Amino acid sequence: MARILVTDDALFMRMQLKDILSKLGHEVVGEAENGLDAVNKVKELQPDVITMDITMPEMDGVQAVREIKKFNSTAKVIMCSAMGQQNMVLDAIQAGASDFIVKPFSADRVQEALEKVLG
Amino acid sequence: MVETENSKSITLLLNGTISSLKSVIPLEHEFSRPTRVMDKLSLPYGVLIGITGDVKGQLIFSGESAVFGSIGEVMFGMPLEGEMLTSFSGELGNMIAGGLATNIGGHGIQVDITPPTIMEGHTTLSGYKKAIHIDMHYPSDRQLGVYFLLN
């Protein structure tokens, strides 16, 4: 079981991800509404895995990954975004993301990503 | 030449959006022919996504709030209302516009999208240079209007 921080500006997506992650047997230790919120909550909660949307107010998800990697270079981040263009995926991976899920996603795809990052 | 390029971009935008709608909303559907909007837009409820990059404008999905609610119920198996319906509506627009950006990116047109703006209550829009409209028809007389406002 992993301790997971869910980051998305949409309440609905946070709820859907929480539901999927709980059913997969993981613990959602916190929710963040934007990239800045996620950076602060990673420091506070030290989750095993972070799910990260990209397009968010305050700080976008790619910038948040860069900030998180500055103080936790081994942080495991799974991007969950509606934006699946090649350059977006490359930016996220270059910033330090471990995997990239395109919305809308299935529980199977979330599980696959978690198995990959948790080794 | 410029007009030809614009027409090509608009065609890719329309096709990319319809393709994205088909993949995001798992419902049987028909869609109307694209029409040019000459007047102000009058919308009962909807979501607006800004498009920046090689093509600039706004993408709007509009319909009765119950249509968004029923799409959410089909996609996620639960009825949606209140704050959750508002959030879902924004996310639906985000997913469709994100799919559009991905689709047209494959044709060499790079765009980014803004976070969604929800229009609750009756909204009238004007001041755009060019607007194109298509209607998506779903079972049980559910209809979703799709508008491209191009700058």
Image (cartoon, helix red, strand yellow):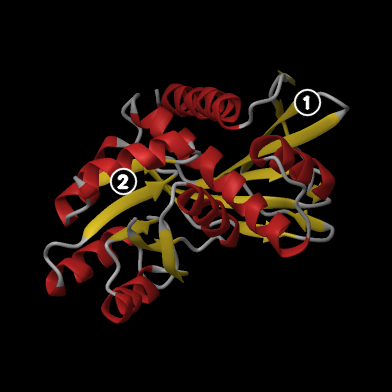
Q: Is residue B20 left or right of residue B70?
A: left
Q: Quadrant of residue B86?
A: bottom right
Mark 1 burial class by Cα count in 10 Å: few <14, some 14-19, many 20+: some
Give the residue at x 80% y 32%: B143
Type of amino acid under label 2: Leu
Mark 2 burial class by Cα count in 10 Å: few <14, some 14-19, many 20+: many
Q: Is residue A40 left or right of residue B87?
A: left
Residue B118, placed above or below residue B77: below
Residue A48, placed above or below residue B136: below
Secondary structure of the residue carrying numbered label 1:
strand
Nearer to me, A90 or A80:
A80
Residue B20, placed above or below residue A11: above
Q: Quadrant of residue A76?
A: bottom left
Nearer to me, A60 or B16:
A60
Give the residue at x 19% y 47%: A93
Picture coordinates of residue A82 (x, y %)? 45, 43
Residue on which disc 1 sits? B138
Give the residue at x 45% y 21%: B4
Residue on which disc 2 sits? A114
Front label number (2 vs 1): 2
